[in-house]
Amino acid sequence: MGEILRVRGGRPLEGTVRLPSAKNSVLPILAAAMLADGPVVVRNVPDLADVRASVAILRALGLTVRRRGPDLHLLPAAVPGWQLPEAPARTMRSSVFYLAPVLHRAHRVRMPLPGGCKLGPRPIDIHLDGLCRMGARAACEGDWLELRAPGRLRGIDYTLRLPSVGATETLVMAAALAQGDTVLRNAAREPEIQDLAEFLNRCGARIEGAGSPVIRVQGKAALHGARHQPIPDRIVAATVAAAVAGCGGSVTLLGTGQDPLGPVAGVLERAGCHTDHPAAESWRVQRQGSLRGVGLVRTGVWPGFSTDAAPVVAGGLLAAQGDTVLEDTVFEDRFACAEGFALLGGQVCRRGRVLAMHGPARLHGARVRAADLRGGAGLVVAALSAGGESVVEGAEYVRRGYADLAGLFRDLGGVIQSETQR
Ligand code: UD1
């Protein structure tokens, strides 16, 4: 049984979207909740496939997890488990976030090597190297990984080989309860790392510099519970904005905190969109005139153009007049969606990390297949701007990062249904 999204494209999008909490904040924060000795409430948690997998892992590790409306309530485990349940752990990359919290709780952790989107090689050497320098010992048996740390992890002064988002988060979690102080250098600076640090600080941790390349953590003996509202999802924001670029119309994004579009706004402006900030906590994207290619866009670590936004922006600019060339510097296989773009009528050429698009292209309905989460969303965005009916197969990938993408676009006037196929 597979899930499909059936799209009738060609209509402008109009209306307002309240952005959900960011998936990339929620997933590490749920794992970090294990570090607290008291109850944790994470607010406005979207019902994503990866959130369900995280809840299954937390319950298997002994926590009590309840959904109350949009919020998740977590109570600590009486006897913490140390082995991650295989099925949910294998479905997502974010199972790696459990290494540090389970090590702290149980002094031992065993998990299958993490799964997730196939975007090229995704090693976890920096997570492991950092944890081992803090006193853990790691061993691999087949594709299972086991770490042990008989005593408390120790604070370190550590320079990451590259600014990995996930490894920075693993090491911040490890440092929060380590003995002594930690300095992380060449740390990733993504807003979701600041959000994780803010959550842990609410629990009593002492983390400074998150959002900069040097993070300093004073290890604490224990953390208490807290309530936390994660930041809005900037990739959902980019997806909606890219769809407005492709379809035309005017959509307002509602969310707290900093501009959720960041560097994506500049690229969409170059393409002929207008973006503004009409009121506090609201950002508007409009496209009335023609759509232009934007030339070369390279993805990069924050504050660069997000790799996750690249396929959705490509979907929105597929029909644009002129050239757009997207180069992903983070992952090798980001543009598996290129084949689907071509079936929808896009003039695309993909070479390794580079996706080149030439227009104007006359997009039409087609049957296409998602190969990963953001590529799948990019195909949906392109299908919304194509004339006629399209079917996007493999929509279960899309559900990993969007609770109800069809419902979100229907509310904006898009014609799109989610269906299960036998
Ligand atoms: C996170 C995001 C993902 C986003 C990515 C880059 C979450 C849950 N996921 O993924 O949506 O696309 O950041 O912004 O937050 N690397 C190593 N060794 C390591 C770790 C990473 O070589 O130990 C490499 C990876 O293979 C990749 C690059 O570093 O080429 C960036 O990966 P990383 O920043 O770790 O991404 P994730 O944390 O997996």
Image (tube, rainbow, N blue to C red):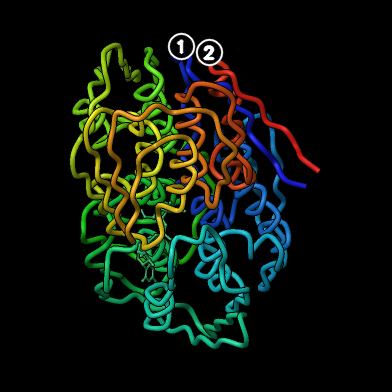
Q: Within 10 angstroms of label 2, few (less than 14), some, or many (20 or more) residues?
A: some
Q: Where is residue 335 drawn, in percent x and y?
A: 40, 52
Q: Within 10 angstroms of label 1, few (less than 14), some, or many (20 or more) residues?
A: some
Above or below, 47 against 189 in this view is above
Instruction: Classify mark 2: helix, strand or loop.
Output: loop
The answer to which of 126 and 334 lies nearer the viewer is 334
Instruction: Classify mark 1: helix, strand or loop.
Output: strand
Query: Which residue is denoted by mark 2 in the rendering?
Result: 413
Residue 206, image quadrant: bottom left
Picture disc at residue 160: none
- Per the model, the C-alpha gap separating discs 2 and 1 is 8 Å
Q: Taking 154 as reference, is 95 left or right?
A: right
Query: Which residue is denoted by mark 1 in the rendering?
Result: 15
Q: Where is residue 104 drawn, in percent x and y?
A: 53, 71
CB contact under 8 Å: marks 2 and 1:
yes
The answer to which of 252 and 213 lies nearer the viewer is 252
Above or below, 212 against 155 in this view is above
The answer to which of 145 and 391 lies nearer the viewer is 391
What kind of residue is marked 1?
Answer: Gly
Ligand 1's quadrant is: bottom left
Residue 89, image quadrant: bottom right
Mark 1, ligand 1, within 8 Å: the answer is no
Q: Where is residue 106 drawn, in percent x and y?
A: 62, 74
